[in-house]
Amino acid sequence: MKRNFTIRQGALDGVEAFLSVAQHRSFRKAAAELGVTPSAISQAVRTLEARVGSALFIRTTRSVSLSEAGERFHARAKPAFEELVAASEVARDLGQRPAGLLRLTVPPSVVPILLEPLIASFCQAYPDVEVEIAASADLVDIAAEGFDAGIRLGQFIEADMIAVRLTPSLPLAVVGSPDYLRRRPRPEVIDDLRGHACLRLRRSNGSIAPWSFVSSKEAVEVVVSGPLIANDIPTVLRAAVEGVGLAQVPEPIAADAVKAGKLIPMLEPFAPMAPGVFLYYPGYRQMMPKLRAFIDHAKSHLGHSQQGPNSQ
């Protein structure tokens, strides 16, 4: 059943109709989506075009496409309108039980030290929330890929994200396999690394991360060299276990291999602290109840509520 399409007075008049036509490239399909007549959609778009002072669509008898002005209007109007819709949903859901699909992008290295002990208890506490974990070493575009949030080590989070600390700072450990140390002398000071095969990490921005240390209470960064560069910590850790070279990784990530005797820590007096693990999300996005529930549960489960200087 068709409903009357009433044009409201204000800046948003016709925007929903415009976005629907832009998505479907069809006035008829937009009308079907919004439950109104095609003539009502056409009138809404004409009124919007009159208000902005430019044609937003190129119309022929066979097709509908965005004009240059329409492309520019769409680039700004679409995210703004989606945020208004999200804000309405947050207000409507206020006080209700968290529910829906919670999508998180997480590096493989963080899964065993954080998510494996956390997810089971969260799912039991919030049965109306479905959790989807996408394990990836890449720093993905959360909004473009449809994620609610990401979880990363603090040094890999972009500055324009809101970050919520989930763990304390983590010590970095230099580790190597017994087989490797039978072939090379164990390094006792930082300068000894010059004679060693050091496994390196490539950051999401393309740069290779230096190794970090503390010497005489001052932070020191060392450019190392070696036979392997990877973009994720598990690959570097596995290579270290296989005797390819030395690796510098967060201590909890190497803990199981160290306990099993597969890796030996070294240079402990010079070990620095890494920022720890943070959950992050875009600053312009409203936090949904399902995400707030996950953050609160994580802090409670981990017994930690400290926040970093750039965190919320």
Image: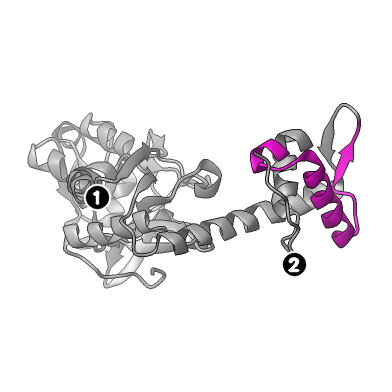
Graded by Cα atoms within 10 Å as few (under 14), some (14 to 19) or many (20 or more), the crowding at tag 1 reads some
Q: Which residue is mark 1?
A: 126
Identify which residue, 205 or 84, lies in the foreground: 84
Side of 78 relative to 256 (left or right)? right
x, y (%) of residue 16?
69, 51
Q: Secondary structure at mark 2?
A: loop
Task: Tell me, yes or no, if residue 171 can be seen here.
Answer: yes
Q: CA distance from mark 1 to mark 2?
A: 40 Å
Q: Which of 188/104 is in front?
A: 104
Rendered location of residue 119, percent (x, y): 23, 45
Position of 144 with respect to 126 (left or right) is right
Q: Are marks 1 and 2 in contact (CB under 8 Å)?
A: no
Is residue 247 at all visible to an observer of this figure? no
Q: Picture quarter containing residue 230?
A: top left
Residue at 24%, 68% in the rendered image:
305
Whether 41 is among the magenta residues is: yes
Q: Which residues are magenta?
A: 31-60
Residue at x-position 31% and y-position 37%: 236
Q: Residue 157, relative to residue 145: is it above or below? A: below
User: Residue beneath label 2, please?
Assistant: 10
- The residue nearer to you, when weighing 153 against 171, is 153
Q: Quadrant of the C terminus?
A: bottom left
Please check the rendered image and state whether residue 39 is part of the magenta-colored stretch, yes or no: yes
Q: Residue at x 72, y 39 (%)?
A: 31
Q: Position of residue 37 (x, y in %)?
A: 75, 41
Residue 4, given in percent of the width and then of the height, sits at 72, 49
Q: Amino acid at mark 1?
A: Tyr
